[in-house]
Image (cartoon, rainbow, N blue to C red):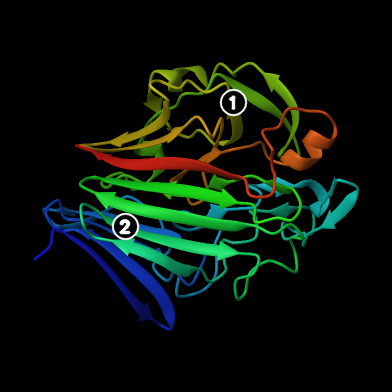
Amino acid sequence: MSRFLVETFEEDSLPVAKLSDTLEGTEALIALGYGFNCYRFTRRGPAGPEEYIHSDPAFPFSRSGPNLNGIPILFPFPNRIAGGRFVFEGREVVLPRNEGGKNAIHGLVLDRPWETASTDTRRKASVTGRISTDSDGGPAALWPFPFRLEVTYTLFGKALSMEAVFHNPGPGRLPCGFGSHGYFRVPGAERVDDLRLTAPFGCRYELRDLLPTGKKIPLDPEDEPYLRGAPVGGRVFDTVYGDLTFQNGKASVRLEGGERGLEISWDSSAPILILYTPPHREAVAVEPYTCLTDAFNLASRGVESGALFLEPGEQARTAMEIAILD
């Protein structure tokens, strides 16, 4: 029997991919038919599978809450666009204001069907999903700038990695940004209050109604303990951080509780970090972004936002890894 397995199947009419490393006892489940959301990452434990990603038990088959479960993929923009509007090259783009009628939020691909581009079981277990403005159910009607997005999940040992590549097939320039919105937990710590958090931030961004002004501000005194590692306790996060510390090309957040831990790391293509504690406090959302929230509107005002404007034929990439710590 091969150490690495990739199985694709349908459950409740929803296509799913399962990645397995039978030697290490790790598995990942990815909803091919619903946003390419990785909604489970488990490792074999003494009492059964130990879960490191938070999802409602009914997700994704409920086909609801795509922004509240697993690892939502945010593209062609992460987080919010103020008022659901921006102007690019003289063209006004109007998007659904799906945040209580106020803003557009969380991109256009997190609840759509993706196609399976490839799988691999030779030296790892991996699956690549693809979506474009031309895909069935794709967002062409909402995003007037053609794109193709490919995301690959790879399982090896105790680590699950994600690589995203976004292409501009032309003919015009493509405004875009990428983010992931993973909800992470540690077995044995039922609430985030019980976790110890270590994070690499160097500054905060000033927010007005959760939208960055573009102004960097110093860390609050309550932030500074997390540079060395501190209990989350009752801390509530919904915060945009920058000036991240990258060591050997990687920045990372650690979540530790009891005898288990998780390290989420990413490369310098994502210089923005959002931390969020949902009201149920059963997970911490660790969100590396390639650009700031509301990046296109900030860029139009001359603010450095990290927004990408890809030329025809150009592509960009970003990568993240989720590693279980013993």
Secondary structure of the residue carrying tag 1 is strand
Q: Residue at x 60, y 20 (%)?
A: 203
Near mark 2 (Cα within 10 A), the count class, few <14, some 14-19 or many ≥20, is: many
4 on left or right of 233: left
| Amino acid, disc 1 | Gly
Q: Which residue corresponds to mark 2?
A: 126
> In the rendering, at what x and y percent does residue 17 appear?
35, 68
Q: Residue at x 78, y 59 (%)?
A: 95
96 on left or right of 8: right
Q: Which residue corresponds to mark 1?
A: 242
> In the rendering, at what x and y percent does residue 54 appear?
40, 54
Quarter the N terminus occupies: bottom left
In-front residue for pair 117/14: 117
Q: Residue at x 52, y 43 (%)?
A: 317
In-front residue for pair 27/268: 268
**Could you say which quadrant of the image residue 112 lies in?**
bottom right
Residue 141 vs 89, above or below: the answer is below
Can residue 295 be seen by looking at this rendering?
Answer: yes
**Could you say which quadrant of the image residue 324 lies in?**
top left
| Amino acid, disc 2 | Ser
